[in-house]
Image (spheres, grey):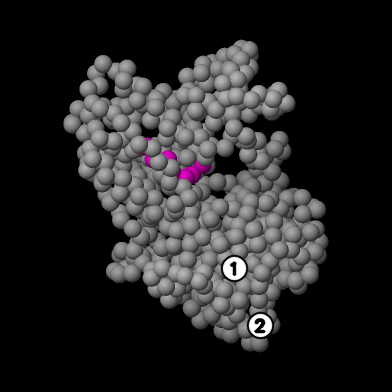
Amino acid sequence: MSQVSILEKHRKQYQPKVPPSLRQGIAKVKVVEGAAAEPAKDRETIRKSFPNTYGKPLLSFQAGVDAGETTPLRIGVVLSGGQAPGGHNVIAGLFDSVKSIHPQSQIFGFLGGPGGLEKGKYETITAERMDAYRNTGGFDIIGSGRTKLETPEQFDRCIEVINSLALQAIVIIGGDDSNTNAAILAEYLKAKGLTTSVIGVPKTIDGDLKNMHIPVSFGFDTAVKTYAELIGNIARDAGSAKKYWHFIKLMGRSASHIALEAGLQTHANVTLISEEVEKRNLSLEQIVDDIARVISARADAGKNYGVVLIPEGLIEFIPSFKTLIGRLNDLLAKNEAAFAKLETADVKIAAMSGWLEAEALSAALGKTFASLPKTIQLQLLLDRDPHGNVQVSLIDTDALLAELVGRKLKASPAYKGKFSSQRHFFGYEGRAAAPSNFDADYCYSLGCVAAVLVKSGRTGYMASIRNVSKGVDQWAAGGIPISMMFNMEQRHGHRKPVIQKALVELEGPAFKALAAGRSRWEIEDAFIYPGPIQYFGPSEVSDAITQTLELEQG
């Protein structure tokens, strides 16, 4: 990082704010044990899977007194999964905390994610290197990866690396799958007699890793503000040109938190929420009809322009589409060898259509498949992910809806407007953005919390900060056992304990706020233009939190 922008130069000087319990340094933090924490269901099954780490107490932090002489800590850190703004500050908080305990403490960054831990690829993070990445976006200080640590052979290789470096702890910064693996690794190490701690940190821009103790995962704030700026810019352009409907797909495969927050921030004309589509059992045709209704109504008002927000995982929440995808997965697995020999797109589509039509139970699905644009048909037949599932991020849902809406309007004699569409996918634009003040503070504090959990000898815990909607002076730091977030789900034909994804709550205040406003936003030009993230200036601007967090927690 030899050259930096002027903004980055000033951001390096930013001093993240931390909760009161951490302000005297982690050597003076008192860890207070609360009640034993258990999952909401499947308790006995999960207890049997985690006999050494199950039922640990909730932890809260208080300012205490200096514990006296300390010894150096040696901690490994892993960035796991997709990027999220603020990851570098988690490492910075961890680095500064362990150095404050003892100047000879060391942080080892494993390169390329969990695979770096398994293979023993790492670099020692020095003060000079850490300083170059403070308050910056991305995960490029050590890189990330999606290797799953789940087999005894993998865990044993990790143990060899842990022993060779004499590590007291591994801190895994990741989402629900990554923290599930962190809990499994913690249990495995404990069962093998190791005292090495494994601590998780909640990361994902999707916002689907949260509960009463984890109000928000880091990166969500920055990513959604980045997308909202772009959406606001597009809305301004749409109102200026007055001739385009913009269909914008937003990241969020399993949950629609990003789309919901972006809708609240910008007042887009249409904001689709996957969870609502599933709850109402809407078909693809009904979704298209509803968008066409809004476009027609605006055309009647002389407005041939607007903005539609689409969650990335929408099609998997459409019941009929979900059934179709499941059947396609089965047929592709069943006919894997035959399908691999097919060379052209037309031949592949024809073969799949024939397989669907040949089964009585799949005949209706065959009609749905046949009604789709050719590009979408082919995307549904692309290579599956490691879990055998369709890669929904590669499906142009924005193009699908734009084309079907266009067909609908063209066939309607009542429609007198002019329909032209533009399509966008906002995903990578927000994953590595420079963290907002909120994420810079939150992530640095999470790193400090992880250090306290390591120092106090905890394992199988996730760093937690609550009351984050009320200003840093009221933030409450602590730790929660990862096992308390588990539920049993079917994975690869087996029931396994995993952290349950938090979906949009249709009875929650954030969705209700969207539902209350959107009938007006459909017709009126009620757009809000959030503008770029502000890092300096009045606190109400530079320290603002998301509307979702304000509505849910405030």
Q: Nearer the viewer, residue 241 or 545?
A: 241
Give the residue pinned by disc 1. Answer: 450
Q: Residue at x 79, y 52 (%)?
A: 152
Q: Residue at x 45, y 58 (%)?
A: 433
Q: Nearer the viewer, residue 308 or 203?
A: 308
Please tell me whether mark 1 sits on a helix, a strand or a loop: helix
Spatial distance from mark 1 to mark 2, Cα to Cα? 18 Å
Q: Residue at x 60, y 57 (%)?
A: 144
Image-based side of 273 in relation to 413, left or right: right
Q: Residue furthest bottom?
A: 69
Image-based side of 112 in relation to 513, left or right: right
Say what amino acid the circle numbered 2 marks: Gln
* x and y, in percent, of residue 97 in the image: 57, 76
Give the residue pinned by disc 2. Answer: 104
Specify the segment rendered in magenta: 247-253
Using the rendered image of the protein, determine whether residue 528 is visible from the camera's viewpoint. Answer: yes
Q: Residue at x 52, y 53 (%)?
A: 204
Please say if 397 is above or below 289.
below
Instruction: Work out whether mark 1 precedes mark 2 in sequence or the reverse, and give the earlier one.
Output: 2
Q: Is residue 471 magenta?
A: no
Please tell me whether mark 2 sits on a helix, a strand or a loop: loop
* x and y, in percent, of residue 373 in the image: 47, 24
Rendering quarter of residue 516: top left
Q: Nearer the viewer, residue 504 or 265?
A: 265
Q: Nearer the viewer, mark 1 or mark 2?
A: 2
Q: Is residue 250 magenta?
A: yes
Please say if 401 is above or below 56.
above
Using the rendered image of the protein, determine whether residue 183 is visible from the camera's viewpoint. Answer: no
Say what amino acid the circle numbered 1 marks: Ala
